[in-house]
Image (cartoon, rainbow, N blue to C red):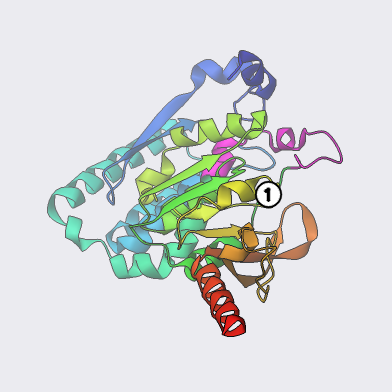
Amino acid sequence: MSDSLWQDVGTKDVTPQKENVLEKRFLNLVSPITGSRVRISFPFVMTKSYNAAGELLSSIRFVVELIPAFLENLQELNGLLENSAGYDALLRWSKQFNYDAEMFLKRDRNGVDYQSFQNTKELLVEHILQVVYNNSVVKPAKLNLYPPSTSSAYGETSFQMVEEMIRYLNITSNDSFLDLGSGVGQVVLHVAAATQCRVSVGIECREWPIFFARVMPIVHWPRFLFFRSGDEFHFPALDELLEEIFLTLNDGVRIVSSRKFAEPDQRLNARNMNDFRAIVKVESLGPAPVSWTSKPLPYFVHTIDRQKVAGAVLSSISFQLILAS
């Protein structure tokens, strides 16, 4: 990535004014859930779209959801933030929190309430994704720098749509996930956080989404709270040339797209039997909001199934034998 992109992003939206930079200090926290560490800058960053203090408080609130014993730590932090406490007071709080976290990890690690985790998992994943986005995409307007009236327009799939896709596909530890046209990687991270898939990968060609996506792995809150990696196939609307690639996919692979590549009741004949549309079963997911239009869009699940072609070929052969007899 070129240095010019870093220069273009700048720092005015995410750091204090220049004269305060030397005064910046840090709070280091140990996760009682995973043992991972997160480093938080102080003074807390606050912009029109981002509040680091609120992010810290909401993240510790999720810790309490899983480990109620940390409620007192949360209440003390809330009081400190409400009273605009200085660095020394917050540093003392962080040291106590870390001591409690390390003791919990040694004694009571099996005391994490995983049933509560299951109950709050969707909210936790949504929180993690928002935290990662806020820390990485510091200038969202850069994502809209594309030539007008082209297929390069940037858009993001809603959290609710990805959740519906995950539930429908029932992604397991045997699956892999690929998001072609992955933007800044929100869907890739979402699938990684919410499923047990083996690996979750995104492919993107536009410069600014790639730039912000590469920043995302250095955001530490996900590993502090609960995070892993995972996989399946997710494709936003694609160019027709990709249909040639689809023809090489194995049976059972599923392609999720806002574009319908074939009709659910498409009939097979000699002219379309070698077409991609001949080897997919198409099912619809309900309309969901997206960022690039005010109108909810439906999504479609295309499952590779060559049995359709095999059945049509056998029917054709049987018909020809009947005619010949």
Q: Callout 1, which amino acid? A: Leu
Quarter occupied by residue 316? bottom right
The residue wearing badge 1 is 238
Q: Is residue 213 magenta?
A: no
Quarter occupied by residue 289? bottom right
| Camera-nearest residue between 205 and 161 | 205
Q: Is residue 215 above or below residue 275?
A: above
| Camera-nearest residue between 141 and 253 | 253
| Camera-nearest residue between 108 and 167 | 167
Q: Is residue 104 above or below residue 151?
A: below
Q: Which residues are magenta?
A: 132-153
Give how far across and how far down residue 230 sits, in percent: 40, 51
Q: How many marks?
A: 1
Crowd around label 1: few <14 · some 14–19 · many ≥20 (10 Å): some
Q: At 20% from the left edge and 62% from the top edge, which residue is drawn?
A: 111
- Image quadrant containing the C terminus: bottom right
